[in-house]
Image: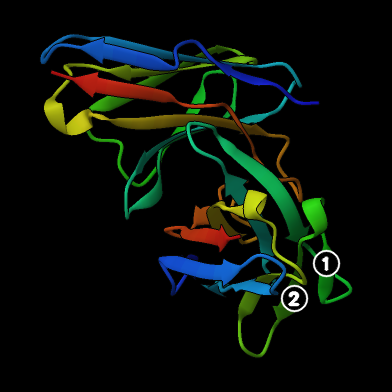
Amino acid sequence: AQSVAQPEDQVNVAEGNPLTVKCTYSVSGNPYLFWYVQYPNRGLQFLLKYITGDNLVKGSYGFEAEFNKSQTSFHLKKPSALVSDSALYFCAVRAPTNAGKSTFGDGTTLTVKP
Amino acid sequence: DVKVTQSSRYLVKRTGEKVFLECVQDMDHENMFWYRQDPGLGLRLIYFSYDVKMKEKGDIPEGYSVSREKKERFSLILESASTNQTSMYLCASSPGGRQPQHFGDGTRLSIL
């Protein structure tokens, strides 16, 4: 079985400050990990993924995420938040043997205030 | 860019109606998915298809069926719509392997 937890329903940061959106996972074997963003009345857009290799992965719009195997975490980060980063963020995990099916977290609403 | 198109952005139907939600992708992806999204519940997988005419139940298949007659098209069917099926429905596709899913913009379905 595979599962994802996003422990914070909401994250609030001031523009220009660093942001972190947390994600922990549970899966058998080495995970494939993904972050997606959803703007109002839109579908999810892919931000970045970890498959193998360097634990720090970089993605779209200046976002990055750090894979930590011992803590089973994959936190999303950005050094300097923008108001336009305000959106709903989803973490997802997939076991390589799981025929393409990912399990998504419940989502974290990020609000960046000017 | 991959494009996943859902036929309707907003749909209003009546209880007991048979409802069809259509999804088309233009990248020859093997896998297609239907999710429903409800506040506080994240994305829940309804059905998954890994090839034409092949399907697999997701976490919440009750009250739904699917059809995949052609590789690019994946239809979700509400056999007899009920008010608890009022939700946002998202379609996605992926080539599988290490690749992410690509999502449509969703259909907001209201059952009255």
- Residue A42 lies in quadrant: top right
Q: Is residue A113 left or right of residue B108?
A: right
Q: Is residue B69 above or below residue A43?
A: above
Q: Chain of mark 1?
A: A
Secondary structure type for disc 1: strand
Q: Rate crowding at label 1 as few (under 14), some (14 to 19) or many (20 or more) other CA atoms within 10 Å.
A: some
x and y, in percent, of residue A55 in the image: 82, 77
Q: Which mark is residue A57?
A: 1
Question: Label 1 sits on what residue type?
Answer: Val
Residue at point 44% right, 17% down? Answer: B9
Question: Label 2 sits on what residue type?
Answer: Glu
x and y, in percent, of residue A37 in the image: 61, 48
Q: Earlier in the sequence, mark 2 or mark 1?
A: 1
Q: Is residue A105 left or right of residue A56?
A: left
Residue at point 37% right, 32% down? Answer: B88
Q: Is residue B25 left or right of residue A51?
A: left
Residue at point 44% right, 74% down? Answer: A7
The reply to whether residue B106 is visible in this rendering is yes
Q: Residue furthest bottom?
A: A70
Q: Are marks 2 and 1 in contact (CB under 8 Å)?
A: yes
Secondary structure type for disc 2: strand
Q: Rate crowding at label 2 as few (under 14), some (14 to 19) or many (20 or more) other CA atoms within 10 Å.
A: some
